[in-house]
Amino acid sequence: MSNGLVAFSDLPVEIGELIISLCDDDGLLALVKTNRYLNWLLIPILLRRLLQIDIQEGVIDANWCPDDPRRLRLLTLLNLWVYKPTLPTFKYTFFASSCQRFVSQYETETIAEFLHRISSIDTLSFQCLDNLAGATSAIRKHDSDLWRLNLVALLKLALHRRCRKLMLDRGPMSTYIHEPSSSRFTAAQSKDLASITSFINCPPTLEVLELRDSMMLLPFFLPHTLDLLRSQSSVLVELMICEDSLGGWKEFFASVSAPSLQQLVIKRKSFQEPFVVSFDLLFKFFHRHPALRRIKLDHIRIPKVVTPPIERTYLFPNLEYLDAHPTILATLLRYPPHFPKLCYISMSLTSYDGYDRAISVLSSELKYSMSIGTNPIPLSFAFNADKSFISWFRRQCESPNRLQYLKDLEEITVILETTWFGEMISFLHLLPDWLAPLTNLKVVRVGHPYHIDVCRRELRNLQGMRPALKIRLFDSLNSICGDRGLREQDL
């Protein structure tokens, strides 16, 4: 320095590290406010020392419990963060409760300011532990408008920072929506949200969007979610929606158009009756998305099996994986040659109507794949057990067993989604009889959302009857679109 003093940045690295190692936490927090160089140097050190986060790995994972003291420490460091990092991944779990409204507002404001300062972010994940037992707080319009404003502000900032992957799980604020305590927000400021919450001017950067029971899927927010999809339609590649209460499927299928979309996953967690959408609406949606490679439509069905017009069967030149209700499968697969890349089919049996017709159509698809010299297409059956399931399944095991039409099948995946122990035992006892017509079967994969030890014990009976059969267990809770290797193990 010109006055003869040595700046900290002029010191040898070893000397600087020695000085820093002698400072306590309060001392480092004081130094980090001194200048940009020390801010750049000390923020990563404080993250490691106070939160065990190594920023060199490019991930800030703050999915902590509500009472974890690290939460406020991280928010403090985010407020002190001055230099502009490039952050690959930021994960944060919000917490909103009736007794901590101020903390929730402080969280959203702090994260918004942090996103404003960083130069770019690749993956942004928000989770919210707001679904506490007995929580039935009503959503008041004023409160919902304010939280809508906060959430959209966060998402718009992320898009302007070139966010490529966005995941919202249980929030933010999906169950609770409380009035923030900050006086800077007034009712007058939230009257006209249409322009404030529009994503139309956001740059198209989002390639992956996952919405799991999120506030964005609630009715009062759905128009903004559709606006987000429209703004990112030119680049969106993967879309996942997991929601039990969404009632806007007709609006979704009618308005979404993302020509680059390659994977569409729609799931529900409860064993409810599937949503019904019209044939025309669903197939017009498919027609707008010719790039689709993987489709999973859990709990979505059409009213009945129909014969699609020939021109509409040229929908999926790239489709590799199809998981849908029997009514959809039996309609789509009537013309197998128009699905040249299809290599995996899954039937989601939330309800059992269309099962017989779908089996017949699937047999045609298998025969076609054999005729052109490819291996038989593996099939998957996902059963959602209700009170009548075992009676229905027992009838399928009796003559005539519909699986006789699939005698060329070599690999089958079977999933039973139930928490009822008795249902699982009865199902596994009947499984050998159900599979009996499949004489060419070589591999059976069984999904085990629960009771893995029981599954293994009961399936040994099937192994004893057919020693040459390979039986594998896998984690069906985390399997999406037929992905293999999810804790898969041989029997």
Image: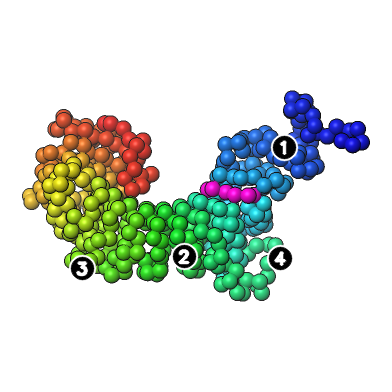
Tell whether 255 sits left or right of 277: right
The residue tagged 3 is: 309
Q: Nearer the viewer, mark 2 or mark 1?
A: 2
The circle drawn on residue 42 is 1
Amino acid bearing label 3: Pro
Q: Residue at x 45, y 57 (%)?
A: 235
Which residue range is magenta in the image? 118-123
The residue tagged 2 is: 230
Q: Residue at x 59, y 53 (%)?
A: 161
Q: Which percent across, then down, holds residue 348?
A: 27, 53
Q: Are marks 2 and 4 in contact (CB under 8 Å)?
A: no
Q: Residue at x 59, y 47 (%)?
A: 66
If you read the primary sequence from the N terminus, does the residue marked by circle 2 or circle 1 appear first? Answer: 1
Query: CA–CA distance between discs 3 and 4?
Result: 58 Å
Q: Which percent across, then down, holds residue 139?
A: 54, 66
The residue tagged 4 is: 184
- Element type at mark 2: helix
- In which quarter of the view is residue 43 placed? top right
Tell whether 73 sits left or right of 170: right
Binning the other alpha carbons within 10 Å of mark 3 as few (below 14), some (14 to 19) or many (20 upward) gives few
Q: Nearer the viewer, mark 2 or mark 4?
A: 2
Tell whether 58 sits left or right of 396: right
If you read the primary sequence from the N terminus, does the residue marked by circle 1 or circle 4 appear first? Answer: 1
Amino acid bearing label 2: Arg
Q: Quadrant of the C terminus?
A: top left
Q: Which percent across, then down, holds residue 101?
A: 64, 58
If you read the primary sequence from the N terminus, does the residue marked by circle 2 or circle 3 appear first? Answer: 2
Amino acid bearing label 4: Arg
If you read the primary sequence from the N terminus, does the residue marked by circle 2 or circle 4 appear first? Answer: 4
